[in-house]
Structure formats: C-alpha cells, structure tokens
Amino acid sequence: MSKRSATEIVDTTSKSARTIENASGSGSKRENVDMDEMGEFEDAWEDEIESDDEVIDAEAGDKEDGNVVSVLSLVPLVETRPGMDVDEVMPAIEESEEPAPAPNVYIPGTYELGKDEVLEADDSVYIMRHSTNVPWPCLSFDVLRDNLGDERQRYPATAYIVTGTQADAQSNNEVVVYKMSSLHRTQKEGDDSDSDNEDDDEDLDEDPILEYRSIPHLGGVNRIRAQPLPPSSPLPPVSQPYYVSSWAETGKVHIFDVRPLIESLDVPGYTYDKARYNNPVFTVESHGRAEGFAMDWASSGPSSLRLLTGDIHSKIYLTTSTPTGFNALSQPFLSHTSSVEDLQWSPTEPTVFASCSADCSIQIWDVRSRGRKSVAGIDSAHESDVNVISWNKSTSYLLLSGGDEGGIKAWDLRNVKKKGSNEPDPKPVAAYNWHKAPITSIEWHTSEDSMFAATGADDQLTIWDLGVEQDDDETGAMDDAPDGSQALPPQLLFVHQGQQDIKELHWHPQIPGTVISTARSGFDIFKTITA
C-alpha cells in the first residue's frame, strides 16, 4: 500500500521565510541543517508567471453545481530560444482592448500536463493558503489543542501540530512539535481597489513563522496521535501531562508528554528537563517486532485514557491509564485475518470501537465482550484493502471508509449485521469513485456533520458534503460526462492539489474550515471558500 512506503527525501531549497532555531538541542541532524531548510514556508505569490499563451485558470469551478474543483491553473514554463541574446530587445507587445478569453476549468483526470506546463493555485478560492517544506517526510501528524480560543475567524492565525519523521536512518528520526504563526489571509479580492483594504493587501506578502521543538525517536514514525481533550477545554497547565503516542517502525508504541515543549514555544526563556521529557513516559511492547499503523485514543477524563493499537499481523491491543501510569493489556482482539489499517473509538459509547483491515472488512468491537472477538461487521466493505475509517462525532451512526481501490463509502452503522447473522452485508448510504488511487486519509468535519475531506495517492485532497442533493435518483455513482471524462458528483465541493504523495489530513478543531495536510513535499494549511 502506498501510504506505508518510506517516501524519498525532498529538496528543501530555501525561499524567504522566518524560521526559529530549535532550542531543544536534541537530534544530531539538526546541527547540520541550514535554518532556511527547516520548516520553510513558501510565499504564495512568489515567482508568479504571467503569459500571453494559453492559460487554463481555476476560477470558481462549476458555478451551476457549486463545485470548486479547479483550484489550480495551467501555465506554460518560460523557455529561452536557441541563439537568443540575453540583451536582445524584444518588440513591444501592443495592448489590446479586446477582453481576455474566459478561462477554462482544470479538472483532474481530464487534461494531461505537457512537458513545459505547471499548475498554479487560484488563490481567489482560498481564504488562507500556506505551504512549508521540512527536512524529512512525515507520514502522520495530529493537531494539538491551544489556549487561543474556539471558533477562531480572525487572521493572522496560529496552529500547533505534532508529527514524526521518516529519516534516512533510524537514529535520525524525531517527534516534532511545530508552532505555525502569522498565518495571514491570502485571498485575492479581484478588482477591489477600496483603500480600506490596503493594509490587508500588505499582509498578503508577510512570511509566516514556523517554530519547533523536537524529541529524539528511534525508528521512523508510522503514525502519531495526541490524547483527546474535551471540546472547549483549555490546554492543561504545564504541570499536567499532554500525551502523544507514536507508532514506530521498530514495533514499539511510545507515549510522550509534550506539554513542556508547547510551553517552551510560547514562553520566552522557558526551559524544561530534556533528560526527562526526551524519553517516553511509557512504551507499549505488546506487538513484539510487528510494526503497525492503526492507533486511536479515547478519554473518559484526565486520568482515564484508553489507547488502541493495531499491527500488520491482525492483532489489536488496548492500553489504559491509571493514576500511577499506563497498563498494556496482554490479550489481543482477534477477528481480522490481515493487517489492521485504522482504528476509531465510538464518540458516544466508551467501550465500543471500529477497525478496518487489508482483509477488506470493517469490524465493530466491544471491549467487554468475551473472547476478544468483534460483535458486528461488514465483511466485504471494499473491493480491496480498507485503508482508513472515520466515525462521525455529531451523527454517531455514520462511519466513513476509504479503500485501496480509491473508493469512498459512507455507512449507516444501524444496518450493520451482528456476528453469526446470515443477513447480507449492508449497502453504503453513499459511495464515490472520484479518486483513481488508494485513499490515504479521511476525516469528518469537526462541526458540519455532513462534510468530510479525503486524500488519495493520486495527489488530490477532496472536500465533500453529503447534504448536497442530487438531481436524479442515483445513489452516488457517477456517469461519464458528454466529452467522455468523468462527471463531477454534486457532493464534491473542492479539489486541492499541488502536493505530491499526500499521506494524511486533519481539520483544525479550533479554526473552523481549516485543513492541514502532510505529503512528501511538506505541510499545507489552508481554508477554502467552501468549508
């Protein structure tokens, strides 16, 4: 599966950005990395090319259907003709009073890029869009809660994330806490020349700031997750732990306390005991040497945490917290027949969780059941591996799944058959085949219960809304467009491109509509006009 592959190291040649040196001092590689190479943000307006040649611009997409799919424009690269003198004076181009032709819409899969063509983002459909390169690719990350408030709409914005690296050697890997600040609004207002917007326009060119603290980590990080905190609750004080767990390629699951690292990013001069916090609070060794990718936290209070981990040998283990530490249970949950790919706790029932596997199934479990077997499931949920799932926190009977064949399905868990039943598998309430490569990540919107986002190995990040009604009686399948290309499903709101080998996405729970994604080329953080 593509989401597992160790991605190649990317060139992080610097553009203009303000980056703060890591004060943690951990990890030998950081000493040899140029500051401009670490956490460099790309200027959204730098190197903009204007051309009289054909430009396929991404305006607002299909206005009639409400889709904003064409978020990238196609621009020919500039070439120097053989024998052309550098100082040669080119004839002036006469200005024409004729209006420019209406731009065409770029739809993925309907146009093949030429040798000298590149895609550029149409920033009129982004309220905010920033990109950053990092020294090593990151397969996984999670959003950290902060004390800046909920439902934030003002700019510049600030976000905190935790991630883990896939370095060239096991000893060079790290768990990294990033603080992304000065994230200014980048939307272009078209022809609006109101003088009141002059200050806002100046903000568009200001560089965001990326600060970080890191912890040494033996082995590449397959997946990383932060402990859940209650909605609208503040970040715990520095005297209380804020746990993150990392699934290492060594087969171990480490639990770290990153609360002091966040404090050192926010409070100038704050120092912490690196000898203490650079080591895990607890390590789950139940999986032996079998690595894995599936992991999810649940919480019934600060001292009642539950961590599920699943490995490539089909085993799922539960680790619980106590007032004195953590306890890894020795008996695994066994019903899958192949690698466990993803895990999700129920948002309403503290003993229930869901899993998906390379055996094509989705299973529902109750930790109280005897024998550690699943209690219900969908045996043939997808045609191939089920890579990812997401449980809707607002409408608790809805579950999303993404498969290796590129399919996305939404399930009504009230229809899932119990184990031992002779009833056939339920039908999904919605199914989409827009992506043409394995789905690598999927997640419901944090507040809009009908919206979700997904990423695929076809380098697309898509935003959907199940609440959009269709024009006919179809159940989600898509017919071909008249020109032979794939038609746009009405539920597809937005397609974000520009990253290569996208691995994971998350909605920011405190900045509504903001999406963060990680790929081989680094991180993107953006908010669209549709979310």
Image (cartoon, grey):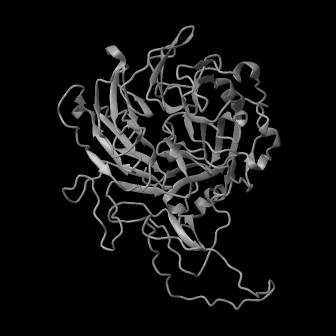
Count of marks overlaid on the render: 0
Tell me what residue is drawn at x 53 percent, y 19 percent. 286
Q: Furthest-top residue in view?
A: 324
At x 35%, y 49%, the residue is: 465
Q: Is residue 530 left or right of residue 286?
A: left
Asked if residue 402 shows in the view, the reply is yes
Front in this rendered view, residue 518 or 212: 518
Q: Is residue 106 above or below residue 384?
A: below
Q: Position of residue 163 (x, y in %)?
A: 61, 36
Relative to 244, is 14 above or below? below
Q: State left or right for residue 9 relative to residue 230.
A: right
- 238 vs 338, left or right, is right
197 versus 365 height, above or below: below
Q: Residue 179 location, x and y as percent?
A: 65, 38
Residue 413: quarter of image? top left
Going 56% across and 39% down the picture, which residue do you hit?
Answer: 140
Q: Position of residue 490 (x, y in %)?
A: 31, 57
Front position in the image: 468 or 193: 468
Residue nearer the viewer, 211 or 365: 365
Across and down, in percent, residue 470 comes to: 25, 56
* Residue 162 seen in render: no
